Structure formats: structure tokens, C-alpha cells
């Protein structure tokens, strides 16, 4: 159960770019798709692209996004990914210190609280 909570915090990020909160997948292929959509819209600014997301009713669908929405979504993704990488970096340092002091369980529980949303 604990591992599932951590994994869901890493594989999803939320954004209100569509006017209300939606969850977006954060797997490697989804990150590539988002980057490619951003690049495509830089060349075709009036076009729209479909990006898969999940609404608050837990309905997952491919929803059209404009260039402005994709740019904001990219920013939201970047902030989320940076926060996760920072949390892992802190966790690694704390875990290395705790291993030498015998407090690894406490560090893990602290880390789990930092990444849950």
C-alpha cells in the first residue's frame, strides 16, 4: 500500500489548464508526447492537440489543448517533476545519514508525506 501511494505521486501531476483540475500521466512516453505537442504548436500556433487527462469524475479522455494551454501544462509538469526530483534528492541524503544512525524507517515515512498530494 505504501509503495502504491508513492508511485501514484510520481506518475501523475495535476493542472487546472482546462479551467478546472485534471490529472495528467507522467510516464516517460507521456512526457515525450507533451514535449512533441509543444514543439508542434510552436510551428503551428493555431492548431490544437489532444492530450490524455483524467477529470475530477475519474473520466480519462483525449482532450484538445491550445498552444497556450500546452505551454502552461508544460510549466505545471516541469514544476511537478522538479518537486519530485528535489524530494528524492533530500530523501537520498536523509536516508544515507539515517542508515549510519539506524533511523531509515523514520526517513521513509517523512519522504512519503512530502510527495503525497
Image (cartoon, rainbow, N blue to C red):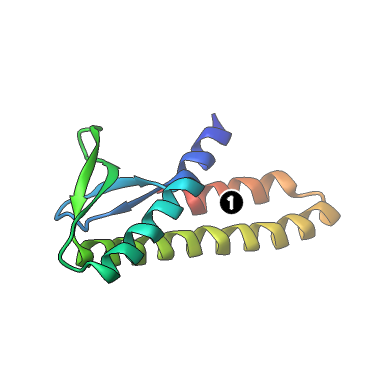
Residue at x 72%, y 62% (from the top left corner) = 93
Residue at x 23%, y 32% (from the top left corner) = 59
Q: Nearer the viewer, residue 14 or 114?
A: 14
Q: Residue 61: percent from the left, percent from the top?
A: 24, 36
Q: Nearer the viewer, residue 99 or 38?
A: 38
Taking 28 as reference, is 79 above or below it?
below
Q: Residue 82: percent from the left, percent from the top?
A: 49, 65
Decide if residue 31 is on the left or right side of residue 52: right
Q: Residue 99: percent from the left, percent from the top?
A: 81, 52
Circle 1 SS class: helix
Decide if residue 72 is on the left or right side of residue 34: left
Q: Nearer the viewer, residue 29 or 25?
A: 29
Q: Residue 4: percent from the left, percent from the top?
A: 52, 33
Taking 17 as reference, is 44 above or below it?
below
Decide if residue 32 is on the left or right side of residue 22: right
Write down the residue under mark 1.
110
Residue at x 66%, y 51% (from the top left corner) = 107
Amino acid at each position: 500500500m505504501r509503495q502504491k501511494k508513492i508511485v501514484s505521486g510520481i506518475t501523475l501531476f495535476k493542472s487546472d489548464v482546462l479551467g478546472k483540475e485534471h490529472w495528467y500521466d507522467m510516464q516517460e512516453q507521456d512526457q515525450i508526447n507533451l514535449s512533441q505537442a509543444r514543439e508542434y504548436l510552436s510551428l503551428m500556433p493555431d492548431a490544437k492537440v489532444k492530450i490524455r487527462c483524467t477529470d475530477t469524475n475519474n473520466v480519462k479522455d483525449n482532450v484538445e489543448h491550445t498552444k497556450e494551454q500546452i505551454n502552461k501544462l508544460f510549466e505545471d509538469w516541469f514544476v511537478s517533476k522538479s518537486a519530485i526530483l528535489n524530494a528524492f534528492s533530500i530523501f537520498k541524503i536523509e536516508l544515507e545519514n539515517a542508515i549510519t544512525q539506524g533511523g531509515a524507517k523514520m526517513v521513509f515515512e517523512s519522504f512519503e508525506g512530502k510527495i503525497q498530494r
